[in-house]
Image (cartoon, grey):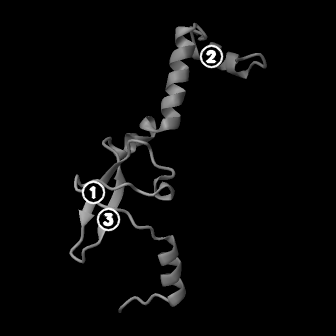
Amino acid sequence: MPRTISHASKREAAQRAELVRLTVRGTLTLPRRVRQGLDKEQLFEVDRREDGVIELRPRALVDPSQAWFWSAKWQQMEREADEDIAAGRVKRFDSMEELFADLDSPTSE
């Protein structure tokens, strides 16, 4: 069954669309609104379909189940943890009980 698109949907899509130029070197600059929320060094899978449409899909070079570790937020937290360790802002415990007691204490930091 063919899919129909209302005139309003076509008009809305046309208003969102922007033209980009393919340079002689084969580069494109994606509009800012398209780049929003993507990493600065984002990789894309590129596919040219039989109907001529070119699709870009954001991809990562890491196992998807491990991608969380490489997110900007997690990497920032890793850097903060490394700084805390280097500055000696760590505690050592001889048992799990001591660890839990410290975590439960109101002065634990």
Q: Which residue is mark 2?
A: 99
When asked about the image quadrant of residue 46, the answer is: bottom left
- Quadrant, the C terminus: top right
For marks 3 and 2 on the same chain, the one whose residue lies earlier in the sequence: 3
Taking 51 as reference, is 41 left or right? right
At a point 35% along the width and 58% down the height, the residue shown is 57
- Is disc 2 surrounded by few (<14), some (14 to 19) or many (20+) residues within 10 Å? few
Give the label on residue 55, or none. 3
At a point 50% along the width and 89% down the height, the residue shown is 6
Tell which tag, 1 or 2, sits nearer the viewer.
1
SS of the residue under disc 2: helix
For the residue pair 8 and 15, the one nearer the viewer reads as: 15
Q: Is residue 16 above or below residue 46?
A: below
Q: Which residue is mark 1?
A: 23
Which kind of residue does numbered mark 2 sit on? Leu
For marks 3 and 1 on the same chain, the one whose residue lies earlier in the sequence: 1
